[in-house]
Image (cartoon, coloured by chain):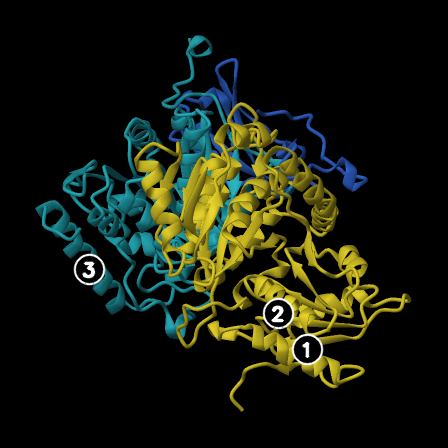
Chain colours: A cyan, B blue, C yellow
Amino acid sequence: MKKEKKMTLTLPEEELMSCGHLACQGCGATLAMRYVLKALGQKTVLCIPACCWAVIDGAFPHSSLDVPIYHCAFETAASTACGVKAGLEMVGDRETTVVAWAGDGGTFDIGLQALSGAAERNDDIIYVCYDNEAYMNTGIQRSSATPYGAWTTTTPVKFFKNQPKKDIVAIMAAHRIPYIATGSVAYPEDLYKKMKKAKDIKGTRFVHIFAPCPTGWKSRPDDSVKLARMAVQNGLFPLLEVENGEKITLNLKLKEKKPIKDYLRLQGRFRHLTEDQMMAMQAEVDARWERLVGGSRPL
Amino acid sequence: MRDKNAKKVVFHSEREMPTMIISVGSQTYNKTGAWRNIRPVIELDKCLKCGICWKFCPEPSIVIQDEWPVVDYDYCKGCGICAEECPAKCIVMVAEEK
Amino acid sequence: MKKVIMGNHALSYGALLARAQVIAAYPITPQTQVVELLSEMCADKILDAMFIKVESEHSAMAACIGASAAGARTFTATSAQGLALMHEMLHWASGGRHPVVMGNINRAMAPGWSIWTDQNDSLSQRDTGWMQYYCSSNQEVVDTVIQAFKVSEQLLIPGLVVLDAFALSHTYEVVDIPDQALVDKFLPPFQPEIRLTPSDPHAFGGLTSPDHYFELRYKLERDMEKAPALIEETGREFKKIFGRSLDLVDPYLCDDAELIFVTSGTAGYTARVAVDELRKEGLKAGNLRMRVFRPFPFARVREVVAKAKKVAVLDRNISYGAHGIFYQEVKSALYGPQPSPPVFGFIAGLGGRDITVDSFREISSYTLARAKPEEDIVWIGVKR
């Protein structure tokens, strides 16, 4: 009888994130936070630089998370987190997980130095970058994580972003840190497992989460999970892990990659692209995927 | 945690404020249900109890009550992800009447 | 225990005795010996601290702030370009109410590259909400670091301990290193009520609207206003245990002085030699060595110079388009309905140009020859 059947929950039911937060409808970044906190648990401290989550949590004197947060300066997610970790250890707390939680701007661009410094020292923090592919909090300006072809307010259609997305996973792999993982908000169980694995590793861990933004991508709010799924299934955002900068594990081997056109069509930020431009982008995705599957470096 | 009865914190004097800039209240005072113009309605007789709507809600404003998914309309922003992702297609987005 | 040490190492000993728990620092001439000795002390387990070898000064202050927020006592040191690079984070430390103590070696700001002493680096940061102490001896450096932690942790306001590049940082002097057990009695462990801990979760420094920001900054200023009395009280406590006192200002023969030099840093002690010589020649000179610059000790300055006929302020710095910075603040202290002596402003020693007893002779001749200042800036030693 349906009435006695239990709900199938593939993740723990307990929430460390409350409602009332200030995210847009359909925000991928909030899904990312929700899943990561489920995996890491309450004994976590988040260092959040300027990014959407600096605002989503709520204004002073309120918060929507059940874990302590240090809101830090834009370029300091990694350096603040290193300091917090050292401070906690010196006051006797070796258990609390310290997480730098930053957007793509604060990771790929202004925060890259501090991240590289922390990774080179192998400081004991988890750095999570939720990537919505532009400076969304300040109004959709381009970052080095913005993909080729995208409209943003600083790459208007006549000068759309003409550089490829910076390969942050390759950069972090070059630091030979113990653990790197990519995650997508459309695959929460995979992300949960990876965060749990990361939690038990010592040293610098880097997790790159694909987090669609309907506001910045000019997509429908109800498409956010769908877009995150499509990006994995068309090879644009592969789900993988890299251990010690060497061992690459592809978590989802695609028998057949879906064409990126369907993914691009759902987003206003790509609406201006011509057939030729889309074909060039498809060729690039195909080439990257071949390199990845073939195991050659760089990623 | 989810304290639906949390009140907005108001300071009448600097003496009431903490020295360090810290949160002292829960953001749940903010009933974001007021944001939406469409609301999800779950047709329970078609519901498979797969948990997917609960899983993908960004608020999260779908809770599990007596083994059924229930929308918390105080907070639901009407994004429609639940309706889009539901494999049984038993969630319908309905216009809010105001 | 007496040791002959350089000024930089005096900073290291201060941090050691204060039992700093987290140090995050980046090397810059002429600060390097501070962090080198601290690295050794940590490696030899003489100092129980974590030393994060950060990749820039900006990250150094960010890490110190993070560690302080987690409840640890933090220390760092820098100079000139490094201090300037930290500027954003200096505001963060004070606004966030983190009692970080930092040593700054006063070095001239580039360009051109200069490693020699000048006060523009620290004085450019005067509005960041940090307390600032200007030291003139290595003994003072050790003693000040220890007291600075005590004051900062009570007020939750960070403190900057400043010393001249090379003239003090690399000068060896006899220092009586305080006994650790006595320092422990004087300075209890840092145990903040509010810190980053999952057992009492808060969001620190969240989005703050015009409805709240004003009051938070009001509270910072009100606490900063408690600092002068607290610094004096802490100095008295320190004297009881260690026999040496440190006050907001260090007046020398000012009681009957007709001409008072106002000085800071190593020039503050050169001035004393000049005062002694001038007195032998019949001039009633005196020296007011400024020790604490922030909070500015307006009342004490007024008190000390009230009966002088003239005040001559020597600045080893300049606020371009205005005047020397100590000059501005001293004038501001003396402005008001009460009668006060005219204030003459002199700029000397920028970029490490030497300040000698002759510099003070030139200052005193100039000042004695005029009833009141004819200009706001008198340049001493510039090749014109």
Q: Quadrant of residue C114?
A: bottom left
Label 2 residue SS: helix
- Chain holding disc 2: C
Q: What residue type is labelled 3?
A: Glu
State the image coordinates of residue C146 (x, y, percent, origin top left).
55, 40
Report the residue at 62% width, 64% height from top: C272
Q: What residue type is labelled 2?
A: Ala
Task: For marks 2 and 3, give the one nearer the viewer.
Answer: 2
Q: Residue A232 carries which label?
A: none
- Label 2: which residue? C274
State the image coordinates of residue B80 (x, y, percent, origin top left).
49, 40
The answer to which of A276 and A78 lies nearer the viewer is: A78
- Label 1: which residue? C364
Quadrant of the frame with the N terminus of chain A: top left
- Label 3: which residue? A284
Do labels 1 and 2 touch, CB within 8 Å?
Answer: yes
Q: What residue type is labelled 1?
A: Ser
- Distance, label 1 to label 2, CA atoms, is 10 Å
State the image coordinates of residue B64 (x, y, percent, origin top left).
50, 20
Report the residue at 32% width, 59% height from top: A147
Residue B61 is at least partly visible in this image: no
Q: Quadrant of residue A246?
A: top left
Report the residue at 41% width, 29% height from top: A89
First reached walking from the N terminus: tag 1 or tag 2: 2
Label 3 residue SS: helix
Do labels 1 and 3 touch, CB within 8 Å?
Answer: no
- Chain holding disc 3: A
The answer to which of A204 and C87 lies nearer the viewer is: C87
